[in-house]
Image (tube, rainbow, N blue to C red):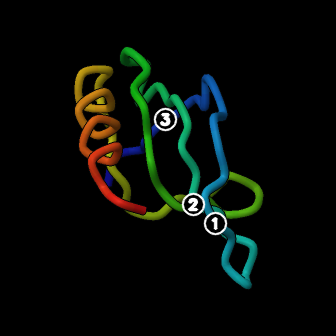
Amino acid sequence: MADINYDIVDHIAVLSESPKGWTKELNVVSWNGREPKYDLRDWSPDKAKMGKGITLKNDDLANLKAALNQLNL
């Protein structure tokens, strides 16, 4: 399996934390030197490991925000 390089460019928020210390975070991440994107996934306490997640372009995030604003939370 190829190495995955990443750089957390901007930490935005921690959404939750598991009993083992893993955190679900929204960050801006550059993957393999590419343009940074919004990223939502679980991270180990030392940020050396990550869970599966999703990356979002600016338009995707704006559409998600609009959809969330429609919910009655």
Q: CA distance from mark 2 to mark 1?
A: 5 Å
- For the point 35% across and 60% down, the residue is 72
Judge by depth and name the residue closer to the eye, 30 or 73. Answer: 73
Q: Please tell me how crowded label 2 is: few (under 14), some (14-19), or many (20+) other residues with Cα within 10 Å.
A: many
Kind of residue indicated by mark 1:
Ser
Kind of residue indicated by mark 3:
Asn
- For the point 37% across and 55% down, the residue is 53
The nearer-to-camera label among 3 and 1 is 1
Rendered-image quadrant of the N terminus: bottom left
Labels 2 and 1 touching (C-beta < 8 A): yes
On the image, the x and y values in percent for residue 7 come to 58, 29
- Disc on res. 16: 1
- For the point 50% across and 30% down, the residue is 29
Kind of residue indicated by mark 2:
Lys
Asked which quadrant contains residue 57, the reply is top left
Q: CA distance from mark 3 to mark 1?
A: 24 Å
Tag 3 secondary structure? loop
The residue identified by callout 3 is 5
Asked which quadrant contains residue 21, the reply is bottom right
**Relative to 18, is 62 above or below?**
above
**Relative to 41, is 63 above or below?**
above
Q: Please tell me how crowded label 3 is: few (under 14), some (14-19), or many (20+) other residues with Cα within 10 Å.
A: few
The residue identified by callout 2 is 24
The nearer-to-camera label among 2 and 3 is 2
Mark closer to the chain start, 3 or 1 = 3
